[in-house]
């Protein structure tokens, strides 16, 4: 397993072990059989991985021959002709970050609600299976409902936004203990088996990093763009760059950078503190040659709204964060729907 960590998935910096693609290994005498499960119809990928597995095990004393068996997910689970749209959905965007804790889900929730307020038909898919938060942030107390006579899932509707989240499947304290293939399966179900209906926009709230879920989405869903959320500090920007690089490798347009927790203004005064640094998001946007779409303040009202299930753009639309999120929604609307917004 340690040697197999040297084998990278083609086009990515992560290895096949951390991606969860190694399903089993069996040593019979000096012959090693490695079983992989992939979610790509591209025959060059298993061929390249197989060659690299054999190369990395060359000279490893207990093994003289290596057999690589590859299982590809069934056609109904993946897009056989590359990334595809979703029936009834006009545009699909991903809200992503390289690092956790930067407020990506808060940005996704407030963006979705802001766009719904402005008249767009919006869905929000919480793709963070391990740390789902959108059911709480949007105040959704519903469990999952299934369409009668089918296996298709009916999304909840909260604040005018259609929602699907693992939080609707699990209790508050229940973990999602999932490995690679199950992660892929749940992600595909959320996107393909949910009855989204006619939407102008589906917002995908991705987990942090560049793992199984991101890989599944960029391989199978035709994204109209990605928003990258970061804080001003370098430790967040380093990981934001990795997320940008991942999307660019698969030709997904970067719509822009969103700097969250940009500054804190002391209530009742104009005194402003840049707690996490100054201008990091702007500099990174310039470096990446993409727009800086918003500089969102660190505001207790944002936290209160998320905990109460009423995003700040609804709960406090005239507050500092509420106004920034509203303006951010208008900017994204102009980018995605120029003819309507004009």
Image (cartoon, helix red, strand yellow):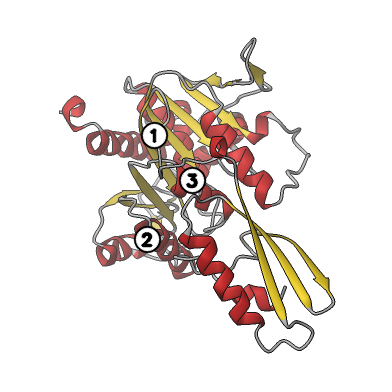
Residue 199 in sight in this render: yes
Q: Nearer the viewer, residue 172 or 26?
A: 26
Give the secondary structure at mark 1: loop
Label 2 or label 3, whichever comes before in sequence order: 3
Is 17 situated above or below 208? below
The answer to whether 201 appears left or right of 160 in the picture is left
- Disc 2 to disc 1, C-alpha distance: 19 Å
Q: Which residue is drawn at 83% across and 72% down?
A: 28
User: Could you say whether the residue bearing mark 3 is in a helix, strand or loop?
Assistant: helix
Please give the residue where the numbered disc 3 appears in the rendered image.
217
Q: In this view, does 20 lie to the left or right of 90?
A: right
Residue at mark 2 to residue at mark 3: CA–CA distance: 13 Å
Residue 151 location, quadrant: top right
Give the secondary structure at mark 2. helix
Q: Which numbered marker is on residue 249?
A: 2
Marks 3/1 in contact by CB < 8 Å: the verdict is no
Circles 2 and 1: CB distance less than 8 Å?
no
Name the foreground residue: 234 vs 212. 212
Q: How far across and down, in percent of the image, does residue 288 sit? A: 28, 63
| Residue 16: x %, y % from top left | 61, 65
Mark 2 near mark 3, Cβ–Cβ under 8 Å?
no
- Can residue 306 be spotted in the picture? no
Find residue 198 and report its image quarter.
top left
Provide residue 278's location: percent of width, then percent of height.
36, 64
Mark drawn on residue 1: none
Q: Which residue is drawn at 46% across and 42% down?
A: 80
Nearer to us in this view, 151 or 265: 151
Residue 122, by quadrant, is top left
Residue behind mark 1: 85
Instruction: For label 3, count other residues whose C-alpha is less than 10 Å away and answer few (under 14), some (14-19) or many (20+).
Output: many
């Amino acid at each position: 397993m340690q040697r197999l960590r040297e084998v990278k998935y083609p086009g990515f910096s992560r290895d096949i072990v951390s991606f969860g693609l190694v399903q089993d290994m069996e040593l019979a005498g000096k012959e090693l059989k490695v079983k992989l499960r992939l979610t790509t119809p591209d025959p060059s990928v298993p061929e390249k991985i197989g060659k690299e597995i054999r190369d990395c095990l060359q000279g490893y004393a207990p093994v003289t021959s290596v057999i690589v068996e590859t299982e590809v997910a069934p056609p109904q689970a993946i897009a056989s002709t590359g990334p595809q749209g979703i029936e009834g959905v006009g545009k699909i965007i991903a809200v992503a970050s390289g690092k956790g804790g930067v407020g990506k889900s808060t940005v996704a929730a407030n963006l979705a609600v802001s766009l719904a307020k402005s008249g767009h038909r919006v869905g929000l898919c919480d793709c963070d299976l391990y740390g789902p938060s959108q059911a709480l942030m949007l105040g959704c107390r519903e469990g999952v409902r299934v369409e009668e006579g089918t296996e298709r899932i009916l999304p909840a509707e909260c604040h005018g936004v259609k929602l699907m989240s693992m939080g609707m499947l699990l209790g508050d304290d229940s973990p999602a203990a999932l490995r690679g293939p199950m992660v892929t399966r749940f992600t595909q179900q959320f996107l393909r088996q949910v009855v989204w209906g006619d939407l102008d926009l589906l917002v995908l709230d991705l987990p942090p990093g560049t793992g199984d879920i991101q890989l599944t989405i960029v391989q199978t869903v035709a994204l109209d763009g990605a928003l990258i959320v970061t804080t001003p500090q370098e430790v967040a920007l380093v990981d934001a760059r990795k997320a940008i690089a991942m999307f660019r490798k698969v030709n997904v347009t970067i719509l822009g950078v969103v700097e969250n927790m940009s500054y804190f203004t002391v209530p009742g005064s104009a005194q402003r503190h840049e707690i996490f640094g100054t201008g990091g998001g702007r500099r990174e946007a310039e470096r990446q040659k993409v727009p800086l779409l918003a500089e969102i303040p660190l505001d207790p009202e944002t936290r209160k709204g998320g905990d109460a299930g009423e995003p700040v753009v609804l709960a406090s639309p005239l507050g500092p964060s509420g106004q920034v999120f509203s303006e951010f929604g208008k900017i994204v609307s102009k980018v995605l729907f120029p003819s309507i917004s004009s």
